[in-house]
């Protein structure tokens, strides 16, 4: 019996679908326009089209369907969230407005922050008090809960975040359960969303979670209903920001964990390719229709961060968004993609993005009502894309309309439409390279010499341009690069990252409290992974802590190892912290006690393995399908560039740039100065000449 697996990734412009037959390694992909107002429409069209291509029925899909989505991110960025209320301790109702009082730009007199996801008029206070020690000084009354419920008429979800609930969740649990019974709407509490110290990050994370519950809940219910009615024999797993997957039921309770699920899936696909290609350091470059994402893979794993900022007012200014305390793949994301719109700013300079044409109306060349030229229009005018072969010819592009759209831009820049298009291409490459370089510098990383793997619909078109700016020696164009994030969900482990704040000094007596807490976290990890279909007996655990020297105000995260229990002695744990602190700050303070603030457990179960069949050997010197006039830089004359069809290339084939390699969903652009070889798995490896 065939072992078919299905993955779906909803992007800002396109919805990607991947079907994988694990025994043979056969892969079938589909790409359809996203339907923002009704996401299931694009999913339904893409899935049924992919099934028809594979020649299988819905009932043939028996393994869980893995799903990544940008619904949560887009809802928070666009402010299109549900009507949610927040309940907090009496006297703390202004926390969302006050934030941390940190100014991300101390000299900006007109400093802006995103409006809280829950407005002040829907923030309610309740008279209760839990002390920092966990002692309950005042419990909420039934009368107070009745009063709260009466005042919340019409809300679609509720967030509960009480003072010091990370130390004792009794009061918070009572309030959440009481309101859920009285209101009949989804209620989330900070002790289950992010039970960690520090009031504002915990509250904003819980508020974002509640505000997106009315967004993801109805969609998942509609999706599961359609799957049942259509005859699918599988459940749904949702991709998390940390690179793991959980059940749809758990995702409905904590949707904030999905905020970067699509980019995380791309990073996991990068890990899969890094292992196959023996690249222990690999830079992932994902350029879709709306955004560009990038992250670094080191030692065959992506770096994780414990806080991810959403909805920044200024994309390059840390602190200008919502600092959500959710484990996430450490990546940089900017508003640059195939739909990014070009314009001239007040200084007369060419700018591209972050505004995007999205799926509706899309770039001008889509012929769906767009009037402002976008990145895809520039690629088309340059000759990098074949207007008759976009999506394999199923969605032809209008070259004449795209060139006309560049006329006003060209007049403003005092140049020709063709030169303006090349300018857009170069600006978008510079934007992405600058963002990646800044992100790396902030983390003390030098990207020079690191190979780049390109994916996303527009990634292969721009990869070599970005690689040259980053001084990357190699670019890897994987098979099915356009839908690689969806493919990444199929190679992702079932995983959950848990964190609990319990402030303790490392010393005698800490083991008992630590082990009791870890027992609870391991049990929760097994429960979540079992609900996602993992074998509880096969769940593995990795341990970490957020620690500082006593008296300090900030912590660093240190991972200490794996096993069924904490793997180090107290002295060894302290030494690991000293080493990590010295790596970050260049010194250690041995005479000061080490204080642990938060304990971490990563629980995971490996994804089912599969192998992709080797590509048949080629002739070594492939024959071009044809030629196309294309330009690669400003001021240069267009060239007659050979065009290869990717499906006709074999393992060992070699060719030199300039060249274009076409497939249904994307085009790999190879400028002059690059040489290419097709690897055994079908990847095209482009190497830059010295």
Image (spheres, helix red, strand yellow):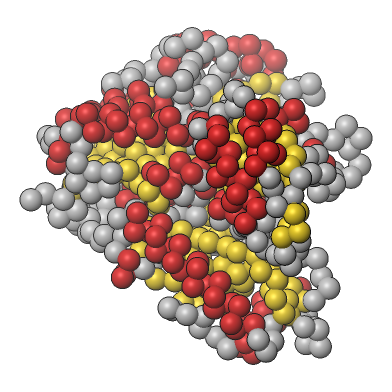
Marks counted in the figure total: 0
Foreground residue among 358 and 73: 73
Task: Residue 495: give x, y in percent of width and height.
Answer: 42, 59
The residue at the point 44 percent across, 78 percent down is 563
Task: Residue 476: give x, y in percent of width and height.
Answer: 40, 52
The residue at the point 69 percent across, 33 percent down is 147
Task: Residue 613: give x, y in percent of width and height.
Answer: 19, 56
User: In this image, 190 relative to 38: left or right?
Assistant: right
The residue at the point 37 percent across, 48 percent down is 247
Foreground residue among 144 and 440: 144
User: In this image, 90 relative to 106: left or right?
Assistant: left
Residue lying at the far left of the rendered structure: 1
Residue 568 appears in the figure: yes
Residue 623 appears in the figure: no
The vertical placement of 513 against 442, above or below, is: below
| Quadrant hosting residue 137 | bottom right
User: In this image, 519 relative to 590: left or right?
Assistant: left
Task: Residue 481: give x, y in percent of width and height.
Answer: 36, 43
The residue at the point 45 percent across, 62 percent down is 524
User: In this image, 29 relative to 544: left or right?
Assistant: left
């Amino acid at each position: 019996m065939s072992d078919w697996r299905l993955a779906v990734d909803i992007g800002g412009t396109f919805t990607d679908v991947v079907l994988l037959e694990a025994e043979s390694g056969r892969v079938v992909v589909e790409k359809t326009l996203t339907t923002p107002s009704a996401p299931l429409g694009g999913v339904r069209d893409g899935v049924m089209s992919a099934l028809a291509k594979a020649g299988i029925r819905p009932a043939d899909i028996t393994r869980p369907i893995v799903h990544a989505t940008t619904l949560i991110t887009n809802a928070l960025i666009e402010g299109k969230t549900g009507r949610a209320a927040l309940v907090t301790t009496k006297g703390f109702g202004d926390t969302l407005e006050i934030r941390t009082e940190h100014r991300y730009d101390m000299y900006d007199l007109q400093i802006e922050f995103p409006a809280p996801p829950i407005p002040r008029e829907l923030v309610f206070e309740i008279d209760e008090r839990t002390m920092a020690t966990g002692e309950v000084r005042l419990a909420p009354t039934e009368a107070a809960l009745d009063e709260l419920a009466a005042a919340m008429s019409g809300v679609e979800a509720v967030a509960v975040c009480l003072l010091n609930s990370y130390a004792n969740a009794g009061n918070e649990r009572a309030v959440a359960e009481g309101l859920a019974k009285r209101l009949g709407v989804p209620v989330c509490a900070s002790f289950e969303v992010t039970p960690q110290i520090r009031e504002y990050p915990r509250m904003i994370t819980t508020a974002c979670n509640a505000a997106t519950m009315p967004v993801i809940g109805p969609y998942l219910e509609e999706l599961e209903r359609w799957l049942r009615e259509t005859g699918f024999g599988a459940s749904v797993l949702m991709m998390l920001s940390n690179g793991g997957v959980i059940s749809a039921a758990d995702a409905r309770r904590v949707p904030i964990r999905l905020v970067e699920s699509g980019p995380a899936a791309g990073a996991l696909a990068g890990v899969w390719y890094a292992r196959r290609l023996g690249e222990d350091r690999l830079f992932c470059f994902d350029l879709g229709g709306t955004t560009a994402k990038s992250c670094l893979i080191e030692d065959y794993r992506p770096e994780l961060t414990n806080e991810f900022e959403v909805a920044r007012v200024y994309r390059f200014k840390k602190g200008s968004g919502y600092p959500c305390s959710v484990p996430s793949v450490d990546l940089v994301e900017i508003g640059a993609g195939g739909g990014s719109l070009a314009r001239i700013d007040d200084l007369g300079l060419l700018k591209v993005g972050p505004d995007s044409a999205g799926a509706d109306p899309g770039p001008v060349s889509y012929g769906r009502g767009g009037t402002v030229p976008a990145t895809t229009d520039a690629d088309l005018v340059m000759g990098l894309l074949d207007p008759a072969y976009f999506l394999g010819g199923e969605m032809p592009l209008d070259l004449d309309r795209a060139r006309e759209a560049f006329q006003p831009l060209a007049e403003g820049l005092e140049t020709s439409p063709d030169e303006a298009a090349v300018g857009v291409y170069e600006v978008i490459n510079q934007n992405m390279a600058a963002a990646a370089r800044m992100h790396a510098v902030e983390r003390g990383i030098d990207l020079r010499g690191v190979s780049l793997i390109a994916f996303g619909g527009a990634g292969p078109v721009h990869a070599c341009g970005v690689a040259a700016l980053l001084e990357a020696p190699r670019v890897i164009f994987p098979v099915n690069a356009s839908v690689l994030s969806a493919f990444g969900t199929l190679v992702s482990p079932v995983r959950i990252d848990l964190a609990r704040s319990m402030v303790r000094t490392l010393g005698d007596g800490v083991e008992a409290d630590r082990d009791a807490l870890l027992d609870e976290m391991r049990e929760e990890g097994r429960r979540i992974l079992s609900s996602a279909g993992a074998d509880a007996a096969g769940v593995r655990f990795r341990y970490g802590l957020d620690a500082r020297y006593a008296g300090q105000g900030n912590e660093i995260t240190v991972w200490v190892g794996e096993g069924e229990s904490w793997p180090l002695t107290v002295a060894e744990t302290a030494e690991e912290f000293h080493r990590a602190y010295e790596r970050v700050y260049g010194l250690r303070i041995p005479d000061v006690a080490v204080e642990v603030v938060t304990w971490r457990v990563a629980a995971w179960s490996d994804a089912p393995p599969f192998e992709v069949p080797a590509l048949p050997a080629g002739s070594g010197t492939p024959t071009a399908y044809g030629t196309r006039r294309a330009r690669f830089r400003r001021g240069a004359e267009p060239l007659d560039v050979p065009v290869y069809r990717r499906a006709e290339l074999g393992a060992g084939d070699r060719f030199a740039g300039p060249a274009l390699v076409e497939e249904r969903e994307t085009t790999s652009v190879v400028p002059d100065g690059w040489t290419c070889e097709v690897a055994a798995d079908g990847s095209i490896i482009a190497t830059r000449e010295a």
